[in-house]
């Protein structure tokens, strides 16, 4: 998914700041640099390739980082793929990628597959997200939902709006969900559905554009995905406040995601890095260093929430330990 509107503003401001310093851009995507860059800080030019895949939720952050990095290290080609958190881990354990992005923690069976393949790795938390429940912009009756309401809807126990609230229309709810390879699906399945089977009538897709188009095309549509993707499409969607453990209906935003009041749908976002790639490929170390130094800024630029600065400092210490620096 592309966040062209948001990133255009980021790009324009960065170009003005760094036009003199960066010169010609090349690599995976042309974009301007960043004063807080790993490459500039080290003063070392590197070349090579960095391969990563995984979560569509984490993709906007890593795409933004890769575009900025291209102006700092133009001889490094960074490829950011999207196949869902689960699909990314499959490629990671198959040795096809150096990094794997995920919107939920790695599962035991995925860890076992990596161990069997002899791949050592480290998990880095890079930002926070608020899983957002959205409906059509013409839906003016849903003013809040509880987790129990969501569970009934997505298990098929409540199929009409009137099944949730008798004052709401007696019309069938149309559901659109991330696919089963998605970490967003896994998170929702665990936290909301408590690992019960999602209703079969839901339309599943790994492409968040399909989910947005489904909801915007149906007055009775409902979907869930990452907060940044809601922001990108907020003019055509309504986000639903969720009742938290204190009984307060809370909308996702930077403050409520960071302070935890948008619970239980606030969640961490991760990237997983292969040790041997960091040790043997200077480009992987340099890019990961740059990513950790700039993840907070890039996360906020595309609509997610940065971690406290000490978290990134701790992550840098981990990375340097892996690299033997």
Image (cartoon, rainbow, N blue to C red):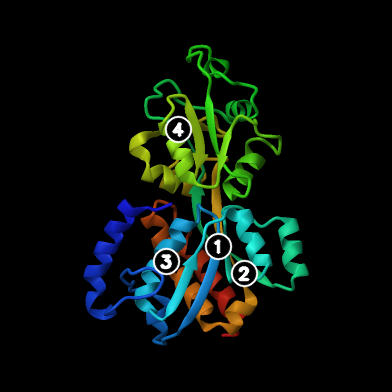
Quarter of the image with the C terminus in it: bottom right
Of the image marks 2 and 3, the number of the one nearer the N terminus: 3
Residue 319 falls in which quadrant of the image?
bottom right
Which label belongs to residue 65?
3
Residue 320 in picture, x, y percent from top left? 56, 79
Q: Helix or strand or loop: what does disc 2 sit on?
A: loop
Whole-number angstrom distance, CA of label 4 to CA of label 3: 30 Å
Of the image marks 4 and 3, the number of the one nearer the N terminus: 3
Q: Name the residue under label 1.
A: 53
Whole-number angstrom distance, CA of label 1 to CA of label 4: 27 Å
Which label belongs to residue 215?
4
Which mark's residue is nearer the viewer, 4 or 3?
4
Labels 2 and 1 touching (C-beta < 8 A): yes
Q: Name the residue under label 2.
A: 96
Is residue 16 something that shows in the picture?
yes
Q: Helix or strand or loop: what does disc 1 sit on?
A: strand
Of the image marks 1 and 4, the number of the one nearer the N terminus: 1
Q: Helix or strand or loop: what does disc 3 sit on?
A: helix
Residue 88 falls in which quadrant of the image?
bottom right
């Amino acid at each position: 998914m592309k966040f062209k509107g948001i990133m255009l503003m980021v790009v324009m401001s960065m170009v003005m700041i760094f036009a003199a310093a960066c010169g010609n851009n090349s690599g995976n995507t042309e974009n301007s640099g960043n004063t807080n860059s790993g490459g500039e800080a080290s003063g070392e030019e590197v070349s090579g390739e960095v391969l990563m895949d995984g979560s569509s939720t984490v993709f906007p952050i890593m795409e933004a980082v890769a575009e900025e990095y291209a102006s700092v290290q133009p001889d490094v080609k960074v490829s950011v793929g999207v196949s869902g958190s689960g699909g990314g881990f499959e490629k990671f354990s198959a040795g096809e990628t150096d990094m794997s992005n995920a919107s939920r923690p790695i599962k035991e069976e995925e860890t076992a597959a990596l161990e069997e393949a002899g791949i050592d790795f480290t998990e880095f938390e890079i930002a926070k997200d608020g899983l957002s429940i959205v409906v059509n912009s013409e839906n003016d009756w849903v003013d809040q939902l509880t987790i129990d309401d969501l569970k009934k809807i997505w298990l098929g126990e409540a199929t009409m709006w009137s099944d949730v609230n008798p004052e709401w229309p007696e019309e069938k709810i149309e559901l659109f969900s991330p696919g089963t390879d998605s970490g967003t699906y896994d998170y929702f399945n665990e936290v909301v559905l408590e690992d019960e089977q999602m209703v079969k009538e839901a339309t599943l897709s790994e492409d968040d554009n399909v989910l947005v188009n489904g909801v915007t095309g149906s007055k009775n549509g409902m979907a869930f995905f990452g907060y940044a993707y809601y922001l990108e499409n907020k003019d055509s969607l309504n986000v639903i406040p969720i009742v938290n453990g204190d009984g307060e209906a809370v909308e996702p935003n930077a403050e409520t995601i960071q302070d935890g009041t948008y619970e239980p749908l606030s969640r961490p976002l991760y990237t997983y890095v292969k040790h041997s790639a960091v040790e043997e490929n200077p480009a992987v170390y340099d890019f990961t260093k740059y990513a950790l130094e700039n993840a907070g800024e890039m996360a906020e630029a595309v609509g997610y929430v940065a971690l406290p600065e000490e978290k990134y400092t701790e992550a840098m210490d981990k990375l340097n330990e892996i690299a033997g620096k």
